[in-house]
Amino acid sequence: MTDDLITAVERSKKGAVVTLNGEEKIFVSRALLIEREFAEGQALQRDELAQWLLPRQYPEALNLAVSLLAQRARSSGEIQKKLRDKFYLPETIEMVLYKLEKEHFLNDESFAMEYAAALSRRQMGRTRIGQELRRKGVAPELIQHALEALDEEEAEDAALVLARKLLKRYEREPDPRKAMQKLLMAMARRGYGFEEARAAAERALQEPEE
């Protein structure tokens, strides 16, 4: 079995990021550096390192994930990215996600449904909601399900609120057609389709805010 080579060791107050073969970066906490020293140019076996590090790194990574979830609901993709950005082992991240899903701390289906509904209430259309869910790493089938589950009446009322705001914003535009064009474009940027935006605009004109 070919040895792997430590090509860099970046130290900080929290520990060190060890780079193997100029490619993979692995975080080792300060407490673990007391047990084992790492130096640039040192040869080791990546599998042996992972076997030693995994049970020690797992509690740290799990605690971080739980603290992130305590701040707000997150998707598994968000947690995965946070841990990956901290350079935890892929094996550690997999274990953390499995534990959180098993204990029902993570549920992407529920997250997608709740987040989609919240964005809809904040006057975002389906296109924008889908983009936001994809950005958070939610699976396409769960995104589709969440969009289909949106309350139609609630979504229409939210679009009406936005259309009323935009009517006020563009009320000084001397050309009504240009004002309407700007309104529709603004709603498109919020993720509303043309027909949906036009219906909201027409309703806003017919039902001015009291």
Image (tube, rainbow, N blue to C red):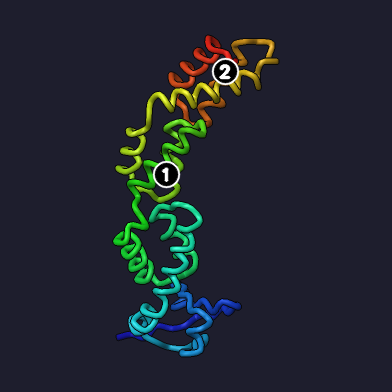
- Measuring from the top left, give residue 97's x and y in whole percent: 35, 62
In the rendered image, which quarter contains the N terminus?
bottom left
Work out how far the residue at label 2 is from the one at label 1, CA to CA, in angstroms: 28 Å
The residue at the point 54 percent across, 79 percent down is: 15
Is 99 positioned to the left or the right of 164 in the image? left
For mark 1, what is the residue? 133
Question: Where is 106 relative to 89, above or below?
Answer: above
Report the disc number at residue 181: 2
Residue located 37% across and 71% down the image: 92
Give the camera-side residue of 6 and 64. Answer: 64
Looking at the image, residue 110 lies above or below residue 14: above
At horizontal 33% and vertical 68% (from top left) the residue drawn is 95
Dot 2: within a 10 Å radius of its alpha carbon, few (fewer than 14), some, or many (20 or more) residues?
A: some
Mark 1: few, some, or many residues within 10 Å (few <14, many ≥20)?
Answer: many
| 27 to the left or right of 181 | left
For this rendering, which residue is in front, 4 or 101? Answer: 101
Q: Earlier in the sequence, mark 2 or mark 1?
A: 1
